[in-house]
Amino acid sequence: DAKTTQPPSMDCAEGRAANLPCNHSTISGNEYVYWYRQIHSQGPQYIIHGLKNNETNEMASLIITEDRKSSTLILPHATLRDTAVYYCIVTYSGGYQKVTFGIGTKLQVIP
Amino acid sequence: EAGVTQSPTHLIKTRGQQATLRCSPISGHTSVYWYQQALGLGLQFLLWYDEGEERNRGNFPPRFSGRQFPNYSSELNVNALELEDSALYLCASSLVTGLYNEQFFGPGTRLTVL
């Protein structure tokens, strides 16, 4: 019952921008979009989150479409260390919702 | 600042036994989450504890249970182990009581059921 759809895998050349898409067509008005990544067999790491405005931090940028039905995580200059599984989740901040991660996108950065 | 810690790192049990996994959240965090990650699968939500209470649980049988202690550390118990319980069990903590907030994950406990 994941609320998001992501491609199972993507490749990106080292030094290029990696654009990871996520569809969340059933998102409700008070739900946020969160992105995490998991490097092989480690615990996931928080990257970024947003509600409706585009967001940027030291790791990545998050672009959310105006209708909020999809978003894109952008890693501006991918490095080999960015090879990981990237998870997009949607959840609202209150009410102890179940948080479903799904299977994510396996990003392979190629030298 | 110490991160989320989990113990043990690896645990090997036989079918029918019980397993106990432990998690210490980041200091000041009141919420603890448990996830199961079987090989090749995504993170499956197991349990959410906040302020000592179970707030939500995923679609797992009752033999998966846990508790949160007054110091906010947590324990996950799996009774009557089955082969398909073999997985990486991840614990995460977050700061704000009663709200979803970014989660900080521990390194996980690898449970193998023989």
Image (tube, coloured by chain):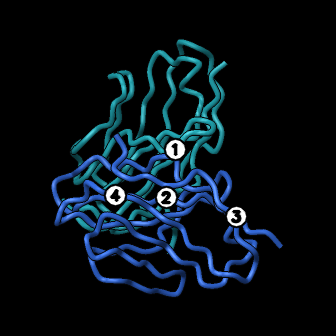
Q: Earlier in the sequence, mark 2 or mark 3?
A: 3
Q: Are marks 2 and 3 on the same chain?
A: yes
The amino acid type, in three-letter code, at marker 3 is Asp
Residue B28 horizontal/vertical position (percent): 33, 68
Question: Is mark 2 in CB contact (under 8 Å) with mark 3?
Answer: no
Question: Is mark 2 in CB contact (under 8 Å) with mark 1?
Answer: yes
Residue, far top: B16
Residue A70 horizontal/vertical position (percent): 36, 65
The picture's colour for chain A is: blue
Q: Nearer the viewer, residue A86 or A12?
A: A12
- The residue mark sitting in front, 4 or 1, is 4
The amino acid type, in three-letter code, at marker 4 is His
Residue under mark 2: which chain is it in?
A
Q: Is A46 placed above or below A28 here?
A: below
Q: Is A37 placed above or below B42 here?
A: below
Q: Are marks 3 and 4 on the same chain?
A: yes
Q: Earlier in the sequence, mark 3 or mark 4?
A: 3
Q: CA distance from mark 3 to mark 1?
A: 19 Å
Q: Secondary structure at mark 3?
A: strand
Q: CA distance from mark 2 to mark 1?
A: 9 Å
Task: Residue at 68%, 55% (x, y): give it.
Answer: A40
Identify the residue position indicated by label 2 in the image.
A87
The chain coloured cyan is: B
Taking the image as shown, residue B49 lies to the left or right of residue B19, namely left
Q: CA distance from mark 2 to mark 3?
A: 16 Å
Identify the residue position indicated by label 3 in the image.
A11
